Each structure stands twice: as structure tokens, then as C-alpha cells.
């Protein structure tokens, strides 16, 4: 799914529930603003938690040794922060098609 597909789907969902009150261009601005807010928060080393969806975090990778694939020579890869996404229990259950109520009982 591309961002354009996401905008189309959100526009259709809003049109079904509220009528055609929002244009596709306005919906694209909303999606872009949402994604920019996530990027800005991650840039500031903040976590973003969207209940029922998951958590975006910054994890610090340690320095490690790797190999240059062309020469096979060892190369040191420096430590750096990387963005990670951890899905919620509900999202994991939805993807694996397990009822969430079954998880609560376990």
C-alpha cells in the first residue's frame, strides 16, 4: 500500500461515515501531517504510542564488526540510533487472525 492508497482509503472511510465533507487534497494533508508528527517526535528521541496499533521507538544500536561484501575485510559499524516499531497485541492478533479475547484469557 502506498501513501496515495492510504489517502484514498481514508477519504473513502470519511465519506461513508460523514458524507463527502473532506476533499482528497485535504485528506492528503492530514495523512502527511500525521506522518510528519511521527518523524518529528522520533527525531527528538520521543516514543509514539498509538493504542491498538503499536509503538514507534528509537533504539540505540551498539558498535559492531561487519564485513565488506566486496573485499571480505572486517569493518567497524559505529553505534547509531535506529527507529523501530513494536505492534500492539491487537495488531499482532489481527495479522495472525487470532481473536484478541483469546489472548486476554491466556
Image (spheres, helix red, strand yellow):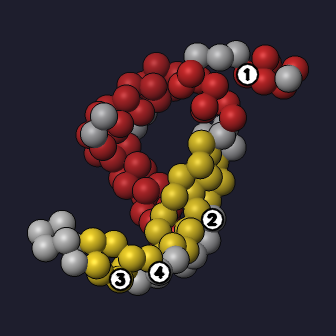
Residue 76, label in figure: 3
| Nearer-N-terminus badge (1/2) | 2
Residue 30, label in figure: none
Q: CA distance from mark 3 to mark 1?
A: 43 Å
Q: How many marks?
A: 4
Closest to the observer, 10 or 91 = 91
Give x and y (percent) for residue 39: 45, 66
Within the image, what quadrant is residue 25 found in?
Answer: top left
Q: Left of 96 or right of it: where is 70?
A: left
Give x and y (percent) for residue 82: 47, 69
To which residue does mark 4 refer? 63
| Nearer-N-terminus badge (4/2) | 2
Is 96 placed above or below 82 here? above
To which residue does mark 2 refer? 47
To which residue does mark 1 refer? 100
Closest to the observer, 45 or 75 = 75
Determine the secondary structure under disc 4: loop
Whether the residues at callouts 4 and 3 have beta carbons within 8 Å, the answer is: yes
Q: Residue at x 53, y 52 (%)?
A: 85
Which of pointers 1 and 4 indicates the residue nearer the eye?
4
Whether the residues at callouts 1 and 4 have beta carbons within 8 Å, the answer is: no
Determine the secondary structure under disc 2: loop
| Nearer-N-terminus badge (3/2) | 2
Amino acid at each position: 500500500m502506498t501513501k496515495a492508497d492510504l489517502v484514498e482509503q481514508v477519504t473513502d472511510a470519511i465519506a461513508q461515515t460523514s458524507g463527502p465533507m473532506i476533499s482528497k487534497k485535504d485528506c492528503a494533508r492530514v495523512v502527511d501531517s500525521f506522518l510528519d508528527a511521527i518523524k518529528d517526535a522520533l527525531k527528538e528521541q520521543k516514543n509514539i504510542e498509538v493504542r491498538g496499533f503499536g509503538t514507534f521507538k528509537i533504539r540505540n544500536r551498539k558498535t559492531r564488526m561487519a564485513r565488506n561484501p566486496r573485499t571480505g575485510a572486517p569493518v567497524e559499524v559505529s553505534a547509531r540510533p535506529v527507529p523501530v516499531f513494536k505492534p500492539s497485541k491487537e495488531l499482532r492478533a489481527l495479522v495472525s487472525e487470532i481473536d484478541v479475547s483469546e489472548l486476554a484469557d491466556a
